């Protein structure tokens, strides 16, 4: 009697595993510092398996970041449809924080590496979306303070979600992080008449 064949990972499973490893490596080591061979080794596949699913490293980056970009596009479209009111801004902040929690590595990538990877189409889409996000929240007449508040809210939240494990000995539960982020981002992005007068 012949032994049973060893189960081989399904194609979708291999693709998903490669995407997960790639995103982790792109976010931690950097896109430029990550090779397809490294991704294959860490994921436990051959480089030819990576190339079977993704023709090039840029294709892999596109596949890794596109879901987050599509989700954020939907959130922005909902916000634009509802109009910029205190109520809709509150709903937006809650959706945005949930988005950050679910897509922390993707957001970290296009915030921290967006400038150095400008020639890559998926990064261009992400950068354009960040500009659209800033304009939706602060308008064309944004002051320097408005722009800094937006930058601190977005960049600070993304950094905190990715890097907090390295500087916090006692990580907070996700529900506490979510509540804290909603409170802080709401305060940073509050309409002018609701903001504290002193900086």
Image (tube, rainbow, N blue to C red):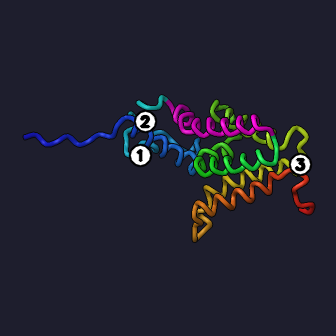
Which residue is farthest left?
1
Q: Is residue 63 magenta?
A: yes
Q: Position of residue 149 (x, y in %)?
A: 82, 52
Q: Is residue 29 left or right of residue 12?
A: right
**Residue located beneath label 3 in the image:** 144
Please tell me which residue is depicted at 67% across the width and 60% down the height of the picture.
Answer: 179
**Residue located beneath label 2 in the image:** 50
Which residue is farthest bottom?
169
Please tell me which residue is depicted at 47% across the width and 31% down the height of the picture.
Answer: 54
Please tell me which residue is depicted at 62% across the width and 38% down the height of the picture.
Answer: 71
> Residue 26: which quarter of the image?
top right
Callout 1: SS? helix
Depth check, front residue: 189 or 118: 189
CA neighbours of label 2 inside 10 A, class few (<14), some (14 to 19), many (20+): many
Name the N-terminal-most of marks 2 and 3.
Answer: 2
Q: Which residues are magenta?
A: 56-83
Q: Is the C-beta separation of discs 1 and 2 under 8 Å?
A: yes
Spatial separation of the CA atoms under disc 1 and disc 2: 10 Å
Please tell me which residue is depicted at 43% across the width and 32% down the height of the picture.
Answer: 53
């Amino acid at each position: 009697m012949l032994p049973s064949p060893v189960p081989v990972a399904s194609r979708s499973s291999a693709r998903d595993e490669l995407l997960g490893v790639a995103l982790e490596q792109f976010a931690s080591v950097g896109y430029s510092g990550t090779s397809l061979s490294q991704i294959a080794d860490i994921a436990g596949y051959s480089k030819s398996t990576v190339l079977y699913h993704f023709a090039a490293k840029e294709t892999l980056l596109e596949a890794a970041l596109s879901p987050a970009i599509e989700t954020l596009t939907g959130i922005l479209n909902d916000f634009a449809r509802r109009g910029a009111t205190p109520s809709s801004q509150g709903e937006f902040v809650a959706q945005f924080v949930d988005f950050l929690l679910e897509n922390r590595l993707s957001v970290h990538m296009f915030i921290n590496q967006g400038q150095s990877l400008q020639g890559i189409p998926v990064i261009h889409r992400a950068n354009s979306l960040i500009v659209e996000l800033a304009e939706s929240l602060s308008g064309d007449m944004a002051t320097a303070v408005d722009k800094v508040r937006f930058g601190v809210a977005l960049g600070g939240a993304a950094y905190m979600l990715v890097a907090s494990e390295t500087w916090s000995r006692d990580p907070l539960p996700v529900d506490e992080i979510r509540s804290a982020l909603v409170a802080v981002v709401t305060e940073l992005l509050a309409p002018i008449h609701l903001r504290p007068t002193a900086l």
